[in-house]
Image (cartoon, helix red, strand yellow):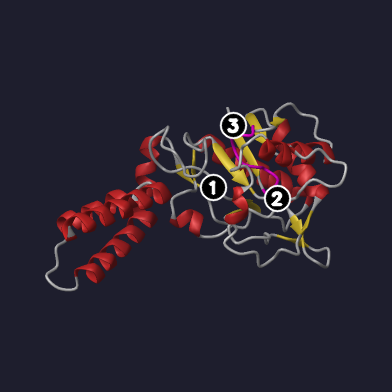
Amino acid sequence: MKTAIKLLTHLTIIAILTALTQVGGVLYGLVLLFYRPQQRKTIKRAAVFTISYFILNLWGIPQLAAYFGRVELPQNEKIQAHNYGYRLLNRHYVTPELKAQLEELADQMQRHEPDLVLVYLDANFPFIDGFPLFPHLSHNDGKKIDLSFVYRDEFGKLTNDKPSRSGYGVFESPRLGEFNQTEVCLNSGNKQYDKTTWLTLGTPNKELAFDAKLNTRLLQNLSANSATHKIFVEPHLKHRLGIGSSKVRFQGCHAVRHDDHIHWQIK
């Protein structure tokens, strides 16, 4: 019984690490197979796994990803992950084409607002088309990325901070008189539709205000890009910001709401 419990525990850890990082489960399994210390097994294996994972994350995976047609996104004064967790979990890989389009978009936005950084959330894993990026329904071919909205602080100053630690879960909800797609989806039985409210990891900047002007410009630039295939954002925001492009559309009740971020995918 004890052996069965240990095996189940290891399999659970492998499954979780695979879902979160793609490669962590494989690495954990290799450490279990080939590293067998005589004393303090748990502590020593955890240390070996952690050190190996960091080395692989920083130097091994970026090189290997190129063989699968993926590159890692930059972390600089124009483009940044909302927090380092996205990079640590290998969720910041895209095709070279999407990276080039993202850099062009950042340049477009900074021509008007030099201090504005284009902040991304989940992109894709580094390897294998079709490998799911939990909890997303797509993000499995290097051509999709979630972008954060633009906000201003309580003094009206442009900020690159976001309302939540994860970048998800704080919604720019429908105003009185605006069409409420969330209500429609929830009432039709799609109870998962607003569950990202539980994925905030805390809301230290909940007082930030949605910048309608800059978010309109961001969506217009995305829509005008010939490489753009689809943009997902909630219907009330598309209407409120006056976005007429057919590329900006509703993602369906089977997904989750998109008034806390923008989903962008290229052809």
Our reading of the magenta stretch's main secondary structure is loop
Which of discs 3 and 2 lies nearer the camera? The answer is 2
Position of residue 265 relative to residue 84, above or below, is above
Task: Give the amino acid at mark 2.
Answer: Phe
* 10 or 101, nearer to the observer: 10
Between 261 and 123, the one nearer to me in the picture: 261
Residue at 76% in and 29% down: 245
Give the x, y percent position of residue 64. 34, 43
Secondary element type, mark 2: loop
Task: Work out how far the residue at label 3 is from the one at label 2, CA to CA, in angstroms.
Answer: 19 Å
- The local crowd at label 1, few if under 14, some if 14 to 19, many if 20 or more residues have their Cα within 10 Å, is many
Q: Which residue is mark 3?
A: 266
**How many discs appear?**
3
- List x then y, in percent, for residue 54: 36, 60
Residue 168 visible in rendering: no
Rendering coords of residue 60 (x, y %): 33, 51
Side (left or right) of 161 relative to 212: left
Identify which residue, 53 or 200, lies in the foreground.
200
Helix, strand or loop at mark 1: loop
Residue plotted at (72% across, 58% down): 115
Q: Write the start and end of the magenta stretch as one range.
A: 252-260
Q: Which residue is mark 2?
A: 149
* Residue at numbered disc 1: 122
Amino acid type at circle 1 is: Asp
Q: CA distance from mark 3 to mark 1?
A: 15 Å
